[in-house]
Image (cartoon, rainbow, N blue to C red):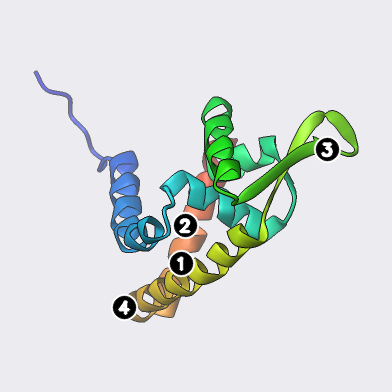
Amino acid sequence: MSPTFVHRNLPRLLLQARESVMAHTRPSLREHGLSDQQWRVLRVLGEHGTVETGRVAREAFILGPSLTGVLARMERDGLVRRAKDPGDQRRSVVEATSRGLELVEKLSLTIEAHYGWMEKSLGKQKLAELYVLLDAVIELERT
């Protein structure tokens, strides 16, 4: 006997939507030698400046051990700089280098153009509603 599902598979739909959006972004990332994870790190740093590595892991959705490797490669490639947190020597902070920030600026143009296309295609109201619904689902599942 097979299980009876009433609702559609929301996690799969969210992943499928993510992959659909990323299909437009990935070629630009690859053109600049970036992985999805590296881009997420640069986006966090571009938005917030110098950030404690734990916060980067949370906001970029990268597990700590994986983030260590990602940051090592990014540091090797001259995209980020790591240091001890001046306020707490047990913690590390990371910031984008000028090269990393240049990539954020270049890629933000392509990404914002894609978001503009989405807004035009879906309509400003529907895209705004999507953001509100996604935020609500995230908040709902936190409680």
**Residue 15 position within the rendered picture, expressed as x and y whole percent measured from the top left:** 33, 45
Separation of marks 3 and 1 at Cα, in angstroms: 39 Å
**In this orientation, which residue lies closer to the viewer: 142 or 93?**
93
Q: Nearer the viewer, mark 1 or mark 4?
A: 4
Which residue type carries mark 1?
A: Glu
Relative to 51, is 23 above or below? below
Earlier sequence position, callout 2 versus callout 4: 4
Circle 1 sits on which residue? 129
Q: Residue at x 47, y 73 (%)?
A: 112
Distance (Cα) linking label 1 and label 4: 14 Å
| Residue 41 drawn at (x, y percent) | 57, 48
The answer for how far apart the CA atoms under marks 2 and 1 are is 6 Å
Instruction: Tell me if label 2 and label 1 are in contact, CB under 8 Å.
Output: yes
- In the displayed orientation, state which residue is furthest to the left: 1
The disc label shown at residue 121, or none: 4
For disc 3, the neighbor class at 10 Å (few under 14, some 14 to 19, many from 20) is some
Q: Nearer the viewer, mark 3 or mark 1?
A: 3
Mark 3 lies on residue: 85
Mark toward the start of the polypeptide (3 vs 1): 3
Secondary structure at badge 4 equals helix
What is the quadrant of the C terminus in the image?
top right
Residue 54 placement: quadrant? top right
Disc on the earlier residue, 4 or 3? 3
Q: Which residue is mark 2?
A: 133
Mark in the foreground, 2 or 4:
4
Q: Amino acid at mark 4?
A: Ser
